[in-house]
Amino acid sequence: MKWAVIVFPGSNCDHDCYYILKDVLGQDVCYKWHKDTDLSSIDCVVLPGGFSYGDYLRSGAIARFSPIMNEVINFANNGGIVIGICNGFQILLEAGLLPGAMLRNKDLRFICKDVCLRIENSETAFTNKTKRGQVLKIPIAHAEGNYFVNNETLHKLQENNQIIFRYCTPEGEVSSVANPNGASDNIAGICNENKNVLGMMPHPERVVEQILGGDDGRLIFESIINSGDQGSVVSINNP
Amino acid sequence: MKTIKVVVTLKQGILDPQGLAIKHAMESIDCEGIENVRVGKYIELKFSNDIPEERLNQICEQLLSNPVIEDYRIETGG
């Protein structure tokens, strides 16, 4: 698979994503600067975490209008696999590729800690190496991860199985005590209706090697690689 | 030069933790009668030309505010 990690001014998880894809998982990966306009031959786009444009105006609001984003939107609309992590998730929301918006964390604090996530849908390109109900331990690091969505859209997300990860206790119970930031319905990650675009607040790229404290995040990337091997990934050139 | 002021606020009903924190601080300095605090953004735009209202609304909805969570108000003149 050929991966592109998009670099915006202020991205700071781009190198982590590049490193784990190339050196740990042996993938073909390149950086794409926000001013680039070409995603041909790319199979999967990663929008990494960070503080694109200093989070000015709203998180992701300025990055959403970077030249590369027109291509990312086309790529996604043609069925290409896109994963947005943390700030990448915020950019996907601002771009309208995913529904909802991010509010400040309920307690106003920047939260950096390991959280537990329950897999709600294991039949996607991002989770096919996991089981429904499985609990993953993956860190979050954000001040604006309080996912907000209106009731009507929330019902749609639930009905279409678009909620992929929910914050839970280590035992897998989804409850308010396990909700770190006040997110609607404990949502930590969602997909679009076609299930080819994922946004998640936790950072799977930070837990891919045991030496760094865990490797649960590896399952997300291995799922994408697996769906690529199965031929279910659509490259923009070969729709 | 035409100055346009845009005020962006969180929609009614959406929790404003920042406003809540300020409210608590106001209570701690004994501000009587404070019932609610909502925090918004003030954006000042200067144009060399007249800009049609429709275009301005478009810009507010597309960039200056996020219609999922925010309302905006346009003030012209000055």
Image: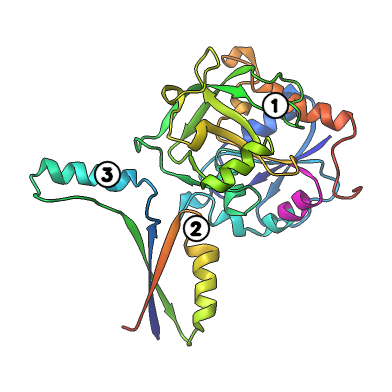
Which labelled disc corresponds to residue A220?
1
Task: Assess whether residue A79 is covered by the magenta stretch.
Answer: yes
Residue at position x 25%, y 52% in the image: B37
Q: Amino acid at mark 2?
A: Asn
Magenta highlight range: A72-84
Q: Residues within 10 Å of mark 3 (few under 14, many from 20)?
A: some
Q: Amino acid at mark 1?
A: Ile
Can residue A8 be seen here? The reply is no
Q: Quadrant of the N terminus of chain A?
A: top right
Residue at mark 1 shares a chain with residue at mark 3: no
- Which of the two residues, A42 or A164, is positioned nearer the viewer here? A164
Residue at mark 1 shares a chain with residue at mark 2: no
Q: Is residue A96 left or right of residue B34?
A: right
Residue at position x 31%, y 83% in the image: B78
- Which of the two residues, A34 or A114, is positioned nearer the viewer here? A114
Label 3 residue SS: helix
> Which residue is under mark 3?
B20
